[in-house]
Image (tube, helix red, strand yellow):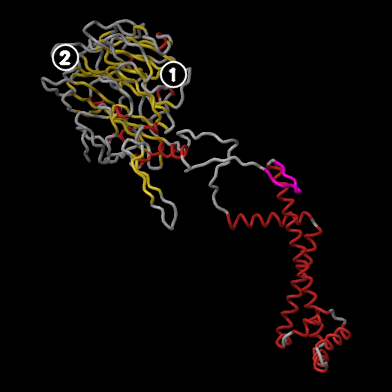
């Protein structure tokens, strides 16, 4: 991943500049350098020390014990030395005081003596001075005879006597000796304290790729055309509610954000392809890009075959055995498999579901116990059934019949039907409507379902289905790249057996091909069940400046999919 290395070291320190290739992930490269080069080294510490002249391997407690014993010895010997020096100085000062008290007689003895030896002997005999005191008096300068100098000598003598008493107390009291050691260590810490640059661990181990990648929440977006990127959530926390938005991402014509998640850098992204394969990436392996960037084409990250595209994306941190994924194919097959079956990886992908010839995977949803599944066919019919109708199966299986569709029709999509939501459908010619989920009777899986829209030749075949909430906005895309963004509330809520209304004007040779949820409304989202947490897209998060929701992200898209600023 490295294209070049520059040595920019100077007198201020080491500076190595590493140029990365365009598709490299900086954190991963850094971790590889830590792992395979001398940029970071680990070493074991052998606690071998000399104890009373004998080499011994010590425990941490023993090392501390012998170090403190050594410090006791050092402080004791130092205190004895300082006590001896202080007592020696005290002795000299006491001689000075005697001399100053008898200054006239001392001067007379010195002046009347023929030699230094005679003067010293007479002073010793007269005042009972020691040899050191006598020599110090004979060498004393005349300025020490002033009253100010006498005061200084007396003050120094008093200070010395305090120190001598303190030194003797240290030598007599072991607790005070330990307190001195403690205070000196604290002083060393205060003077030389720097942050630890090494990490202490019980044992050396290899660095994993994500060990040094900070765990933080990232916004991951993937467009219909297959461009993916991630960027920190904080990028969008800068916006307040009800603002005008900001200049957005530069997307190609007819492209729009189809999958959007908030996931940790250490979470997994599962990519399910139309050919029934699943690919797995860590979120940090997805290249980070700016808010205006289009992102990286998914084919540069995953080994997709020719004609293979991504039909569903699931974000998850773990793979619990009690949670399931529900698969649906274009020919009406469904399969429910425990998530722990996908807790493995292979470079060229794993088989997520076995497909018949001509069939393709169209939808994957995280499903929780007791939830309802709704499937819609291009023939205009919808079937609602409980998830328990599909028993759990292994990974490499084909599944069971979820919806019976005629030979000339196919399943448009599968969604998890939440109470209080609507089923939105739209035909190739732009006629659509929304119908309350409660109007659809619950059936056993495998049936043809009931009509969700009255089909006519003028309106064309049913093209797209989505489960929408009352506050959602949707983006409708045609094959020619025309994009219309409209609030769900503006689309009539009609019964099942109706023809719908014109939602989008579609040219004669054009067709509606896709619908995406543009935002999840202005209300604060309630905490969803774990099974739906990532399937619903970006849940709102509290921040200091307001609430983050999809419309904060969606301000990046203009009404026509181009970069605009309102």
Quadrant for the N terminus, please: top left
Magenta stretch: dominant SS? strand
Name the element at disc 2.
loop
- Which residue does the image show at 25% across and 19% down from the upper left? 307
**Looking at this view, is 440 or 129 the one in front?**
129
Question: What residue sits right under mark 2 in the picture?
Answer: 460
Say what secondary structure mark 1 lies in. helix
Q: Which mark is residue 339?
A: 1
Q: Tell us which disc is closer to us: 2 or 1.
A: 1
Residue 476 point in image, percent of width and height: 22, 25
Can residue 566 be seen from the camera position used here? no
Dot 1 crowding, Cα within 10 Å, few <14, some 14–19, many 20+: some
User: Is residue 453 among the parts visible in the rendering?
Assistant: yes
Write the start and end of the magenta stretch as one range: 48-57
Quadrant in which residue 338 is drawn = top left
Q: Residue furthest right?
A: 125
- Above/below status of 541 relative to 190: above
Q: Residue at x 43, y 11 (%)?
A: 392
Q: Is residue 527 left or right of residue 45?
A: left
- Dot 2: few (<14), some (14–19), or many (≥20) neighbours within 10 Å? some
Q: Quadrant of residue 566?
A: top left
Measuring from the top left, give residue 384's x and y in whole percent.
34, 11
Q: Which of the marked residues, 2 or 1, is nearer the chain's N terminus?
A: 1
- Mark-to-mark CA distance, 2 and 1: 38 Å
């Amino acid at each position: 991943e490295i294209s070049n290395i520059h040595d920019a070291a100077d007198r201020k320190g080491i500076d190595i500049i590493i140029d990365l290739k365009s598709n490299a992930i900086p954190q991963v490269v850094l971790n590889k350098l830590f792992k395979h080069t001398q940029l970071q080294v680990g070493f074991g510490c052998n606690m071998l020390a000399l104890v009373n002249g004998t080499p011994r391997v010590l425990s941490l407690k023993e090392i501390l014990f012998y170090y403190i014993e050594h410090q006791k010895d050092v402080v004791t010997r130092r205190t004895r030395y300082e006590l001896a020096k202080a007592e020696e100085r005290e002795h000299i000062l006491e001689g000075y005081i005697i001399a100053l008290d008898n200054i006239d007689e001392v001067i007379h003895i010195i002046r009347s003596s023929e030699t230094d030896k005679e003067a010293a002997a007479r002073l010793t005999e007269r005042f009972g001075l020691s040899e050191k005191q006598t020599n110090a008096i004979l060498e004393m300068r005349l300025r020490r005879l002033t009253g100010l100098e006498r005061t200084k000598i007396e003050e120094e003598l008093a200070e010395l006597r305090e120190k001598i008493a303190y030194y003797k107390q240290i030598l007599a009291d072991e607790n005070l000796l330990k307190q001195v050691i403690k205070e000196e260590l604290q002083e060393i810490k205060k003077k030389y304290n720097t942050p630890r640059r090494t990490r202490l661990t019980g044992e050396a181990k290899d660095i994993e790729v994500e060990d040094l990648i900070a765990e933080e929440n990232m916004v991951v977006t993937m467009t219909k055309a297959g461009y993916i990127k991630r960027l920190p959530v904080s990028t969008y926390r800068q916006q307040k509610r009800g603002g005008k938005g900001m200049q957005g991402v530069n997307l190609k014509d007819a492209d729009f954000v189809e999958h959007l998640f908030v996931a940790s850098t250490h979470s997994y992204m599962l990519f399910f392809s139309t050919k029934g394969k699943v690919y797995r990436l860590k979120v940090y392996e997805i290249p980070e890009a700016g808010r205006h960037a289009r992102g990286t084409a998914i084919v540069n990250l995953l080994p997709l075959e020719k004609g293979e595209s991504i039909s569903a994306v699931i974000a998850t941190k773990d793979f619990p055995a009690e949670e399931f994924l529900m698969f649906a194919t274009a020919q009406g097959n469904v399969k429910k498999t425990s998530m722990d079956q996908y807790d493995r990886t292979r470079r060229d992908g794993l088989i997520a579901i076995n497909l018949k010839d001509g069939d393709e995977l169209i939808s994957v949803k995280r499903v929780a116990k007791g939830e309802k599944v709704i499937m819609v066919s291009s023939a205009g019919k919808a079937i609602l059934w409980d998830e328990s109708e599909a028993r759990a199966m292994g990974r490499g299986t084909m599944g069971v019949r979820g919806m019976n569709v005629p030979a000339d029709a196919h399943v448009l999509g599968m969604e998890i039907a939440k109470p209080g939501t609507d089923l939105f459908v739209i035909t190739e010619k732009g006629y659509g409507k929304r119908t309350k989920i409660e109007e659809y009777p619950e059936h056993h899986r495998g049936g043809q379902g009931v009509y969700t829209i009255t089909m006519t030749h003028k309106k064309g075949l049913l093209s797209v289905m989505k489960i929408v909430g009352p506050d959602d906005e949707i983006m409708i895309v045609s094959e020619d790249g025309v994009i219309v963004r409209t609030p769900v509330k503006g689309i009539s809520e009609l019964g099942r057996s109706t023809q719908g209304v014109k939602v989008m004007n579609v040219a004669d040779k054009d067709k509606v091909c896709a619908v995406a949820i543009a935002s999840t409304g202005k209300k604060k989202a309630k905490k969803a069940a774990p099974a739906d947490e990532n399937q619903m897209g970006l849940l709102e998060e509290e921040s200091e400046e307001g609430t983050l929701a999809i419309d904060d992200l969606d301000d990046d898209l203009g009404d026509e999919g181009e970069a605009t600023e309102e």
